Image (cartoon, helix red, strand yellow):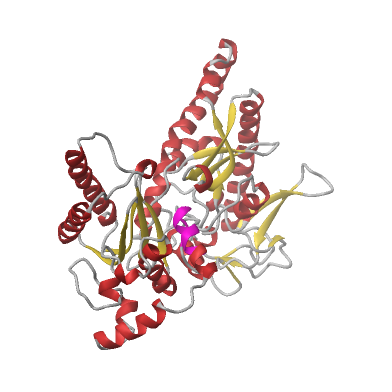
Amino acid sequence: MARKVRIFVEDTAQHIVLKSINSLTLFKDAPDYGAFMALLQVINEKIEIDIHAYVLMPTYFEFVTTPLDQESISKFMQSLGRQYVMYFNKKYHRKGTLWEGRYKSSLVENAYIFDTMRYIETLPSSEGLVNDSTQYLYSSVHNNLLNQKNKIITPHKQYKGLGYTDEERLRRYSQIFYAKINAQKENFIVTCLEKQLVTGSPEFIQKLEKLIGVTLGAKTRGRPRKKQKQQGKSMYKKLVVLDKNNHKELKVNPMTDLNFAKTSAFVPVIANEVALVGAGFPIVFTADEKPSLVSLVSLGGDSLAINQEGKWITSYVPSFIRKYPFSIASTKENPDQKVILIDEESALVSNTQGNQLFLEDGEQSETLQNAVKFLTSHETQMVITQNVAKAISDSGILEDREIAVGEGDEKQILVNGFKVVDKKKLNALSDDILADWVRKGIISLIDAHLKSLDHIETLFKIAQQRQS
């Protein structure tokens, strides 16, 4: 995943720049600027986006806009870029693109709107094109600062909030525009745009991450295995040994809300459900010394598999989720002896309502008996799964993989610390190994695993849908 994911959040502005290839001069004379401005206005009328500030510089076009829907910016930029290339190439008898690649974008918190607008409108003077930015013809400064209206500009709601009259808004924006420049803040704006991060406070970023389920802040490279392992177990708050004396009044309610697993970045799966879970989400191998199979359900934020109503979004819920609030573990004294655990702080657990776990004589109720059977079966299948995963890992056919967006210095790792099967190495295994794996069903598991990797793209699609 080399391409940077596009983030759309309703009623949230974006800072955008489109640069020329190899610093090619885009506007060689006044008619070039005029042609681009004319295209800007015509396309803006057809594909509605609210442009709040802009500047045409010799080698790039930069602006602040609020898109009206998820596709409007991409459609706007494609149309604008394509039509200006046609104009430019025809006039200067050339071929090929004018642009270095896709446009760069950054979501902008309202608190940074004026700083971003001023940064854009002062670029001509800061880069030495003019002494005073108000002398520059091809920017929004004349509209926002001098009240020379043009049809391209739609005032941002923050700008409208500066006053009830145009005069009052101009006066207050003038105070912002001519205030002492905060170099640290401007560097922050530039960095966020170049790396396509969010131009906003940590609180704003956390709010967006919770909303859309995608990590938006800068992420260091590496393999945070311990952190991921904790995230996978975070649905349990306080596991204790289930005891008929201490918990004789304890009851458990039916599972109707899965938000207890909302912060799980991955979900462990057992071998016989790889195809079922993999029909909706990617199944991968952990990068531990003792590898296991997990389903990736996050791009660094909350689980994308659980919707706002607390429901799993596909038809099959993994058994690891369904065994909650119970778990099973070995005793320290005897590893072969198992005990049943329960999350005392689970919202499903109560002393007043739900299904009783113990009868009056201390015997297990039908509810608890069924839970124990499920846990025992799951534990058995988990051991089988770990043995299969170890056999696959020992064969040397697994390779490290990560999910990232952007390239080079702009690369942002969303998920790492997992492995997938390398098809070439798989096909290079000896015939006797492959035949043995076919008989044992391991090849079927691998096929389901490889097919499930197509759903990495599904995670991005879910995130985009959740944004809008």
* Residue drawn where x is 82% and y is 49% of the image: 332
Q: Is residue 210 magenta?
A: no
Residue 185, can we see it?
yes
User: Which image quarter is the N terminus in?
Assistant: top left
Residue 155 versus residue 261 in the image, above or below? below
Front-most of residues 54 and 427: 54
Q: Which corner quadrant of the image does residue 51 belong to?
A: bottom left
The extreme top residue here reads: 431
**Residue 257 visible in image:** no
Which residues, given as a range, are shown in magenta?
A: 188-198
Q: Is residue 440 above or below residue 31?
A: above
Towards the viewer: 405 or 255: 405
Seen at 28% across and 38% down, the residue is 97
| In the image: residue 148, left or right of residue 349 | left
Q: Residue at x 36, y 70 (%)?
A: 132
**Residue 171 at x, y percent in the picture:** 33, 85
Does residue 217 appear left or right of residue 12 in this picture? right
Looking at the image, residue 332 sits to the left or right of residue 116; the answer is right
**Which residue is painted at 59% across and 15% down in the image?**
433
In the rendered image, the vertical position of residue 110 relative to residue 193, given as above or below: below
Q: Position of residue 454 (x, y in %)?
A: 41, 37
Q: Main secondary structure of the magenta part?
A: helix
Residue 191 colored in magenta in the image: yes
State which quadrant residue 156 falls in.
bottom left
Measured as percent of width and height from the top left, residue 437 is found at: 56, 20
Position of the C terminus by quadrant: bottom left
